[in-house]
Amino acid sequence: MRILLFTCLAGLTLIACAPPAHIRAMEEASVSRGDWPEILPLQDLLNAGNDTAGTQISAQEQGARLASRVNGLKSRARRLQGPVIDEARRARLLAALSRENG
């Protein structure tokens, strides 16, 4: 009895997870109509992500860029640790909340 119940539950679960027929039909139609993507050479893809356009960056320049980025992130972290709203606005918000919550 338990095996039959578990089998039915597993079957219903699989049916519930399957997409409806009209969605499957749309997916199949859109896939069959589309053109195959153009295959690019690997070197073109690697160069596309390179912001220096093929020129080499020295270790000192990389270190300077990294140090600049670290300093910017530390500065942002310090700003985010401070209060978000000033004391006057905080007092007004707390007063409004106390009035609403009575």
Image (cartoon, rainbow, N blue to C red):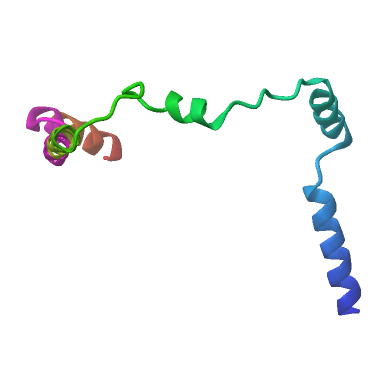
Q: Is residue 93 above or below residue 53?
A: below
Q: Where's residue 44, x and y in %?
A: 50, 25
Q: Which image quarter holds the C terminus?
A: top left
Q: Is residue 84 left or right of residue 40?
A: left
Q: Is residue 46 left or right of residue 22?
A: left
Front-most of 18 and 71? 71
Q: Residue at x 34, y 24 (%)?
A: 51
Q: How many marks?
A: 0
Q: Where's residue 62, x and y in %?
A: 20, 35
Q: Residue at x 80, y 30 (%)?
A: 27
Front-most of 5 and 79? 79
Q: Is residue 57 left or right of residue 13?
A: left
Magenta stretch, main secondary structure class:
helix
Q: Is residue 67 above or below residue 51?
A: below
Q: Is residue 79 left or right of residue 47?
A: left
Q: Where's residue 53, x and y in %?
A: 35, 21
Q: Residue at x 84, y 71 (%)?
A: 6
Residue stretch rendered in magenta on the structure: 75-91
Residue 98: in magenta span: no
Check the image and name the residue furthest to the bottom: 1
Q: Is residue 70 above or below residue 86?
A: below
Check the image and name the residue furthest to the left: 87
Residue 82: in magenta span: yes
Can you tell which quarter of the image residue 82 is in? Answer: top left
